[in-house]
């Protein structure tokens, strides 16, 4: 571990780490140089769950959950009924996605569902692999996941904006976008295309909820919604029965279902969130997390605004149907541009002991980096100090 750690202490059963002021901080999140946090690891929501004490605590006796099956009558036969119910309830409470005419397919994170969707949406009898595209800057895992096993069914074909091949294709639309937080729509719009809407960040703490999404295939994940990335629970809302069945088949072949313990825990946590939104005197999860995100974005903008070296995207205020107020987006990542004569912003920041992910990884310009806004408070504060000192020495 390259990071200098000054102390670790046990608190409520979890280990807390204190950083020294010259620690390398990892805001890239999947670079294994130091493993303080991973891929947008939502550690900042920990404070909410600490305040909630034992509200999510429950026991699973040894005689429970032995079977592979959770509900033999359901198309997705390994989906726990409690989880299905709480997923639907949460979407109804927030109003961010239609659930009435969709099948729920649970996955080991939405990463498994991305693969299940690729399998289910690729025509089985084409002479060449189906093209998979997404508009730049795209989520860097799409090309990695698509080409990892060199499937004969599908193949990464890059930026959706320049895709002009005829025939079947699959387009990933990430909205709000990882990495840049923008609201996205499908780009290619050709007859034989299938679109997967990855709505991992379409929750009120990150963005105003402007409509109830009603797409054919929508992906969500507990990682970004509740903050429990470690439970590895994702879900797909799928309109077409055959597509839902094929996605279920993919998960059956790859892992014979999804951990019941993780499903039950996620159901409990989602239930607590829905209750927190419905009961006037409780600590509304989304409002609490939105406040945290807004504070961080306020601080980052203040620091970045002190010089002209770095720039951040602007997010115009929109009316949020969930909060009933106009608000700006507070994305999970800052898509920062360096205006200095630095060809490689990631390398430049690395020299200042900040690990961020290069724009290149997102099919974009190396003058950009993606910085996670979801790290622990301490890491975020050190990051701001580093930015300030870079600006001070560059002025
Ligand atoms: N989609 C997007 C856009 C993401 O940012 C992530 C996580 N970084 C995922 C999917 C995968 O999330 P998980 O596998 O943790 O559910």
Image: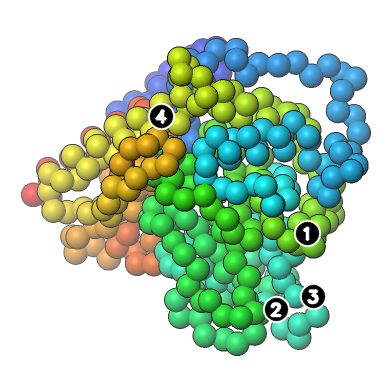
In the image, taking residue 216 as reference, residue 372 lies left or right, namely left
The residue under the point 67% across, 47% down is 100
Q: Name the residue under label 3.
A: 124
- Is residue 33 visible in this depiction of the protein? no
Q: Name the residue under label 2.
A: 129
In the image, taking residue 63 as reference, residue 38 lies left or right, namely left
Q: Between disc 2 and disc 4, whose residue precedes?
A: 2
* 1 or 3: mark nearer the eye: 1
Q: Between disc 1 and disc 3, whose residue precedes?
A: 3
The residue under the point 55% across, 34% down is 93
- 376 or 132: which is nearer to us? 132
| Callout 3–callout 2 Cβ contact below 8 Å | no
Mark pair 3, 2: CA separation? 9 Å
- SS for tag 2? loop
Q: Name the residue under label 1.
A: 241
The single residue placed furthest to the left in the displayed view is 395
- 319 or 15: which is nearer to us? 319
- SS for tag 4? helix
């Amino acid at each position: 571990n390259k990071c200098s750690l000054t102390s670790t202490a046990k608190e409520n059963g979890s280990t807390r780490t204190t950083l020294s002021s010259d620690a390398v901080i990892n805001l890239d999140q999947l670079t294994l140089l130091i493993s303080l946090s991973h891929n947008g690891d939502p550690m900042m929501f920990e404070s909410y769950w600490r305040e909630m004490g034992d509200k999510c605590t429950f026991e699973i006796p040894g005689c429970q959950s032995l079977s592979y099956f959770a509900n033999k009558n359901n198309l997705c036969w390994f989906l726990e009924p409690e989880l299905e119910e709480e997923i639907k309830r949460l979407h109804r409470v927030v109003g961010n996605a239609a659930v009435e005419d969709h099948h729920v397919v649970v996955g080991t994170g939405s990463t498994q569902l991305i693969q299940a969707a690729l399998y289910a949406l690729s025509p089985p009898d084409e002479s060449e692999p189906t093209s998979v595209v997404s508009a730049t800057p795209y989520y860097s895992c799409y090309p990695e996941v698509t080409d990892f096993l060199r499937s004969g069914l599908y193949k990464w074909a890059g930026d959706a904006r320049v895709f002009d091949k005829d025939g079947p294709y699959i387009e990933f639309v990430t909205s709000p976008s990882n990495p840049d937080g923008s609201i996205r729509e499908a780009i290619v719009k050709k007859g034989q295309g299938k679109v997967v809407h990855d709505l991992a960040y379409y929750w009120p703490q990150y963005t105003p909820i402007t409509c109830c999404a009603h797409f054919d295939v929508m992906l969500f994940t507990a990682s970004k919604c509740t903050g429990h990335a470690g439970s590895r629970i994702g879900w797909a809302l799928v309109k077409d029965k055959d597509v839902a069945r094929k996605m279920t088949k993919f998960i059956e072949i790859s892992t014979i279902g999804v951990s019941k313990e993780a499903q039950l825990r996620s159901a409990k946590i989602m239930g607590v969130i829905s209750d927190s939104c419905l009961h006037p005197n409780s600590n509304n999860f989304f409002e609490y997390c939105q406040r945290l995100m807004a504070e961080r974005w306020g601080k980052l903008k203040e620091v970045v605004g002190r010089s002209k070296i770095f720039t951040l995207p602007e997010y115009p205020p929109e009316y949020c149907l969930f909060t009933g107020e106009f608000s700006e987006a507070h994305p999970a990542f800052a898509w920062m541009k360096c205006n200095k004569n630095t060809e490689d912003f990631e390398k430049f920041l690395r020299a200042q002991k900040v690990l961020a992910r290069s724009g290149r990884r997102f099919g974009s310009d190396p003058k950009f980096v993606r910085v996670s806004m979801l790290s622990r408070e301490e890491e975020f504060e050190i990051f701001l100090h580093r930015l300030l000192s870079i600006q001070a020495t560059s002025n």
